[in-house]
Amino acid sequence: KNQVEQSPQSLIILEGKNCTLQCNYTVSPFSNLRWYKQDTGRGPVSLTIMTFSENTKSNGRYTATLDADTKQSSLHITASQLSDSASYICVVMNSGGYQKVTFGTGTKLQVIP
Amino acid sequence: KAGVTQTPRYLIKTRGQQVTLSCSPISGHRSVSWYQQTPGQGLQFLFEYFSETQRNKGNFPGRFSGRQFSNSRSEMNVSTLELGDSALYLCATFTGAGNTGELFFGEGSRLTVL
């Protein structure tokens, strides 16, 4: 069964600090992995995409890593800002007959001043 | 170009009523999928439509139904509402080919059942 697990479930950090969110998946056959940011009451927005051959990708202060061997990904946020307060959802897509998507339950990040 | 548009953004219903939510995908996109999001369950897949045909369905009761029109706009309907149906309902359109596919989400419809 395809599964995506995220940790921690929630996290509180001080503004300016760094943090790392984790995602473990058992999706096969693997197509890509995306990290989405979801502000409260809004729709999720894609931050990064990782394909099988990629192991690091950055988008501003966000850096995603992928280890396809261990089926793990991480999202590192540098110099956090209050606007980073959101839920971060790991989404893994497989390459079945038509695209299939498995969602993690998300990590709720709160950045406090 | 316009993104995925969902209406209404907020609505309040009472138990036993029914509700219809609308989703207009990005222009030219024919795939529309619907998700229910609750605090404890995360995003749960409801169904997916492509060119007016439902091609995948999640594990929800028959009270949840949907359809897609020839212009790719989609509606979902929930009949005989229950308190547990209170959630954010998200619509998404799939785009891309190969291993770069992406789901673009709308802002959601927040349903509260009293």
Image (cartoon, rainbow, N blue to C red):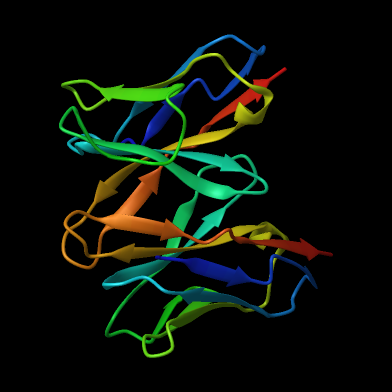
Quarter of the image that includes the C terminus of chain A: bottom right
* Position in image of residue B4 (x %, y %): 36, 36
Q: Which residue is drawn at 20% across and 56% down?
A: B96
Q: Which residue is drawn at 22% across and 65% down?
A: A95
Residue B41 located left or right of residue B65: right
Q: Quadrant of residue B51?
A: top left
Q: How many marks?
A: 0
Figure check: A31 above or below A78: above
Q: Is residue A31 left or right of residue A25?
A: left
- Compared to residue B30, the image places residue A92 above or below, namely below
Specify the quadrant that holds the N terminus of chain A: bottom left
| Residue B88 or residue B83, whichever sits in front | B83
Residue A21 location, quadrant: bottom right
Q: Which residue lies furthest to the top in this view?
A: B17
Q: Position of residue B21 (x, y in %)?
A: 44, 21
Relative image position of residue B73 (x, y in whole percent): 27, 24
Identified at 61% across, 10% down, the residue is B16
Does residue B77 show up? yes
Q: In this view, does B75 lie to the left or right of A6?
A: left
Q: Check the image and name the residue furthest to the bottom.
A: A69
Give the camera-side residue of B91 and A56. B91
Residue in the foreground of this view, choosing between B58 and B100: B58
Q: Is residue B3 above or below residue A11?
A: above
Residue B3 visible at all? no
**Percent position of residue B37, x then y:** 56, 42
Q: At x 24% / y 55%, what residue is drawn?
A: A99
